Image (cartoon, grey):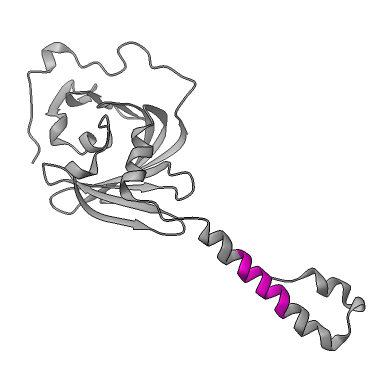
């Protein structure tokens, strides 16, 4: 930090400059310490409650898999348990209707159906994220990020990254049983001022009996 005093050196004797600089530095450090003291640590449940209060969200996403492959698309989320991920330049769509999750490939006309409870989306899209009933593997608060690591019933882990100031969700990573990580970064998010169209989260009834299993 450079003080404005140096721009007006003629106002101060040369020998006085170091003392003025020290006073300026001390004031800066005191101010920084005060600001830090005004930012109390948040608890994991406070983070979860803030995120749970967001009932719907839409925006863009960037998905990065364990091999570094990158795809982008549009996402729509609604509590409890509803989601739709549409990928750019891809025939694949992922839909959760509150009970099931389907991966639909329009080009191949294939449907892979899973119980929502088998997937990390159950933790992400719960009506209320109650950490007392979830296994917390880690919680870390740093100057730039707050991270929360949870484990689902299927032993699949999900790490959620939040903004430390707004507590808004920035990204999440799904870590499978082989410790392979897939990260979803959120961009251009909105949480109000819109409604989802009818059928946004529908799965055809005749497909809901064709259930698959996670490996």
Asked whether residue 24 is drawn in magenta, I would say yes
Residue that extends furthest to the bottom in the rendered view of this protein: 15
Q: Report the label total.
A: 0
Most frequent secondary structure within the magenta stretch: helix
Q: What residue sits 41% from the left and 28% below the top?
A: 58
> In the figure, residue 134 lies in which quadrant?
top left
Left or right of 188 on screen, residue 103: left
Residue 14 falls in image quadrant = bottom right
Find residue 158 and report its horizontal and vertical position in percent: 24, 46
Residue 7 in view: yes
The question of residue 139 being in magenta is answered with: no
Rendering coords of residue 5 (x, y %): 82, 72
Q: Residue at x 66, y 75 (%)?
A: 26
Residue 96 location, x and y as percent? 23, 25
Q: Nearer the viewer, residue 116 or 128?
A: 128
Q: Is residue 69 visible?
A: no
Q: Position of residue 11 (x, y in %)?
A: 91, 76
> Residue at left 42%, top 17%?
195
What residue span does the magenta drawing correspond to? 22-31
Q: Quadrant of the C terminus?
A: top left
């Amino acid at each position: 930090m450079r003080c404005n005093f140096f721009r007006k050196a003629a106002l101060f004797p040369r020998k006085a400059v170091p003392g003025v600089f020290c006073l300026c530095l001390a004031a800066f450090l005191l101010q920084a310490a005060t600001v830090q003291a005004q930012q109390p640590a948040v608890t994991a449940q406070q983070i979860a409650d803030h995120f749970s209060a967001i009932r719907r969200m839409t925006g863009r996403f960037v998905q990065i898999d364990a091999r570094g492959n990158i795809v982008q698309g549009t996402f729509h989320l609604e509590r409890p348990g509803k989601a739709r991920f549409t990928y750019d330049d891809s025939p694949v769509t992922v839909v959760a209707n509150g009970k099931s999750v389907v991966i639909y490939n329009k080009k191949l006309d294939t449907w892979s159906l899973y119980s929502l409870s088998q997937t990390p989306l159950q933790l992400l899209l719960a009506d209320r994220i109650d950490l007392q009933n979830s296994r917390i593997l880690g919680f870390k608060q740093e100057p730039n990020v707050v991270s929360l690591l949870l484990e689902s019933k299927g032993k699949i882990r999900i790490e959620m990254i939040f903004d430390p100031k707004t507590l808004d969700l920035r990204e999440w990573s799904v870590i499978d049983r082989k410790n392979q990580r897939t990260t979803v970064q959120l961009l251009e998010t909105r949480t109000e001022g819109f409604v989802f169209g009818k059928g946004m989260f529908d799965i055809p009834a005749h497909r809901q009996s064709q259930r698959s299993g996670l490996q």
